[in-house]
Image: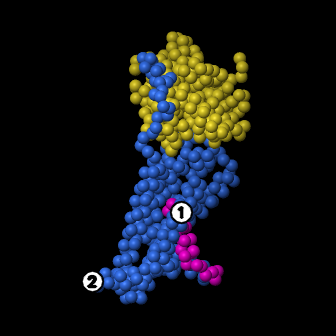
Chain colours: A yellow, B blue
Amino acid sequence: MDQPIIQIKNLKKAFGTREVLKDINFDVHKGEVVTIIGSSGSGKSTLLRCINLLETPTGGSILYHGENIMTTGKVHQYCAKVGMVFQQFNLFNNLNVLENCVVGQMKVLKCERQEAEERAKKYLDHVGMLQYINARPRQLSGGQKQRVAIARALSMEPDVLLFDEPTSALDPEMVGEVLKVMKDLAASGLTMMVVTHEMGFARDISDRIVFMADGIILEDSTPEELFNNPKHERTRAFLNRAMEK
Amino acid sequence: MEFFHWVQVILDNYGILLLKGTGVTVLLALVGTGVGFVIGLLIGVYKTLPIRPEDPAVKRILYKIFNFLLSAYIEVFRSTPMMVQATVIFYGAAFLFSLRLDPVMAGMFIISINTGAYMAEIVRGGIISVDKGQFEATHSIGMTHFQSMLYVILPQAIRNILPATGNQFIINIKDSCVLSVISVTELFFQTKSAAGATFQTFPAYFIACVIYFVLCFSITQLLRYLEEKMDGSDTYTIYGTEPVINGADTLKRGDK
Ligand SMILES: Nc1ncnc2c1ncn2[C@@H]1O[C@H](COP(=O)(O)OP(=O)(O)OP(=O)(O)O)[C@@H](O)[C@H]1O
Ligand SMILES: [Mg+2]
């Protein structure tokens, strides 16, 4: 197999004395969709935040195309290529929809405005938000905001896109529109890591599902394997609880 | 009526002076608020720099030392009256360095650093009140701290502190009168001269009162207008002439 885009090796994260990630190891290959599931507090968000360097790991390493990002000193270039979609959208409130998708391209990737706008419009069209390029974030619904946030991340043409519970802050009737966009992205071959509580969705789109508990990865397998034949008792208990909902 | 008579007399003879005084007052307030805002912005940005435990020790120590000096500046100027600051600086310069400062220049300097001390805290508050998610989003697309400040955080922080800045401007219009203590020829100083020359204290100060009010009141209105302008329109134009039925909308319907 070719070199993974991202390799996580013995990753650790502690807040003070509290160890939230204990010893995380896994790879993400090009085009893979990896879903991370697990109960609340198991460290899913912390893991994504470490990969995006929103948190500084306290141990281990993260290799990006084989290079340790902690030591290469190319943090900003790396972040530009590893996008993140947040639970709370975090659209730039001072900018309209188009500028949200343009500012990073121009300031970080140093694109010309025209090129940046064209690309922004392309991705806004992908997520069905092209009509709203002049709107401000506060004028959009939650589902619309999240679709713009996805377009913003895509406009950077990332190698990997991380999603941290992208639908958890949405009203139920808006969940579908965002999941649909994500499904299309997964089908288009984008490399994705998704933290979600939507089990049906995880099962549909994932190439692999990672089950986390107490800061470690308990299982890392295909959706079929994990849902039909979980190896651990805790996985089984978690899935049962998740399915009841 | 005698009152109106004296108002007329004062306006006829001292109108130009009072007008000049008003000009100096507005100049002091403008310069004070403007420069003070810039000082506050610089300090506010400095104080919110992300210094982490894993940064080199030299950097952390230098940061702390400079931070301490800034805090000292802020506390000293916030804990003493501007009238006393003016006197100490103006006469101190003469006493210690034999410097004869131009009163208006000295006044602008004092009101600026005084305002800067207040604005520093206002700006810092404005920056830390911007949602942490905004910082995280800038980081996630690879922006540096500086870019993040420039394009996303400060525009929001400045919008949020606009009312407080306007308030500072109005305070400066009024409190610049204490600079008359070092003979700055602002409105209060000129009013005092007019009152002294005519022996008509009440009519003279009544005129000053009206001028101060008109200044402050119109500035308040102006700032309110500016705020609305900055918030942008409540509506937005739909892009594209034809109603676009695109990806997600059709899919949403087909989804379930
Ligand atoms: N900044 C922080 N300081 C201290 N503890 C933290 C911090 N961030 C997270 N934690 C702790 O780390 C643990 C894991 O948090 P994390 O947010 O990664 O969980 P999660 O799996 O994403 O949960 P959820 O499904 O509720 O989002 C929690 O116990 C949390 O209290
Ligand atoms: Mg979480």
**Disc 1 with disc 2 on a shared chain:** yes
Return the x and y of residue A203 as percentages of the image width and height.
Answer: 51, 16
Task: Identify the element where label 2 is drawn.
Answer: loop
Q: Quadrant of the N terminus of chain B?
A: bottom left
Residue toward you, A141 or A214? A141
The magenta stretch is B96-119
- Amino acid type at circle 2 is Met
Residue occupied by mark 2: B1
Return the x and y of residue A191 as percentages of the image width and height.
Answer: 61, 24
Residue at 67%, 26% (x, y): give it.
Answer: A5
Residue toward you, B78 or B200? B200
Residue occupied by mark 1: B34
Reply yes or no: does residue B108 show up in magenta: yes
Residue toward you, B13 or B60? B13
The answer, for residue A90, to whether it is visible in the render is no
Vertically, is A16 above or below B163? above
